[in-house]
């Protein structure tokens, strides 16, 4: 086993619903995420995948248990510290690509770099580099509305990796894509792991993605199952 970048200990997340009862969305989750690998969290809708990835990515806090990221326990950090962690060391790719429609592909990537306070004089070159890496160097001046769903998702990936985060979280990034395009996106993730040594955690309910992963955790009713 290599170096672990992210670990959880007895992670639980409960939600109260309208009638006052409690839903146990996550129950005693213990996982280890190896640095420089593609890890998939798989499971049906409602299994707890998104709840787990939101906690791992410091978007939500657990009811109980801890998350360690690069040797630091992050669940007890202040909101300001968690915001800094997400901005500089993490990146997110969502099912809805959340691109700015009035901006070109390159401008979307540069905007992400600006938020991460990437040096101004290097932003244009870096945007060109990552768009070329995802195969969109010839589409860099097109806006999202002029692109296919798969191309838009690749722009979102380019934006996510541009500031060289320590870890990328991808929540159902292929859910709205056809099977062929989905496999191309996951193959791109695999190439990023191989070429850049990136750590990527991806959720999916698609069994065709499983063979590409370095590690797979399966969730059922909020628990990790074999």
Image (cartoon, rainbow, N blue to C red):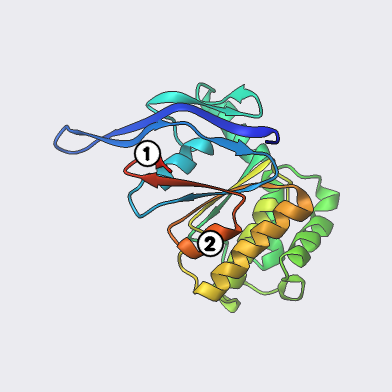
Label 2, secondary structure: give it: helix
Near-viewer residue (219 or 108): 219
Residue extending farthest front: 226
- The residue positioned 75% from the left and 47% from the top of the image is 197
* In the image, residue 15 above or below residue 140: above
Q: Please give the label number shown on residue 209.
A: 2
Near-viewer residue (210 or 192): 210
Q: Classify residue 5 by image quadrant.
A: top right
Estimate the x, y position of residue 23 in percent, counting from the top left: 25, 36
Estimate the x, y position of residue 90 in percent, counting from the top left: 63, 41
Does the image show residue 108? no
Estimate the x, y position of residue 125 in percent, counting from the top left: 84, 58
Label 1, residues with CA under 10 Å away: few <14, some 14-19, many ≥20: many
- Residue 118 located left or right of residue 75: right
The residue beneath circle 1 is 223
Near-viewer residue (55 or 46): 46
* In the image, residue 130 above or below residue 69: below
Residue extending farthest left: 19
N-terminal label among 2 and 1:
2
């Amino acid at each position: 086993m290599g170096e672990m970048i992210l670990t959880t200990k007895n992670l639980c997340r409960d939600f109260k619903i309208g009638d006052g009862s409690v839903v146990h969305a996550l129950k005693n989750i213990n996982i280890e995420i190896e640095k420089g690998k593609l890890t998939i969290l798989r499971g049906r809708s409602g299994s707890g995948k998104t709840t787990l990835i939101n906690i791992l990515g410091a978007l939500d806090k657990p009811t109980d248990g801890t998350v360690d990221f690069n040797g630091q326990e992050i669940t007890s950090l202040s909101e300001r510290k968690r915001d800094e962690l997400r901005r500089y060391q993490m990146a997110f790719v969502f099912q809805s690509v959340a691109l700015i429609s009035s901006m070109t592909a390159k401008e979307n990537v540069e905007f992400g770099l600006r938020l991460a306070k990437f040096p101004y004089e290097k932003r244009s070159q870096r945007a060109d580099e990552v768009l070329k890496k995802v195969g969109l160097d010839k589409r860099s001046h097109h806006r999202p509305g002029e692109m296919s769903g798969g191309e838009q998702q690749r722009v979102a990936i380019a934006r996510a990796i541009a500031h060289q985060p320590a870890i990328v979280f991808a929540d159902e990034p292929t859910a709205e894509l056809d099977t062929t395009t989905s496999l191309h996106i996951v193959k791109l993730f695999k190439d990023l792991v191989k070429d850049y040594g990136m750590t990527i955690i991806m959720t999916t309910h698609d069994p065709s993605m499983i063979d590409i992963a370095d590690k797979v955790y399966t969730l059922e009713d909020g628990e990790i199952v074999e």
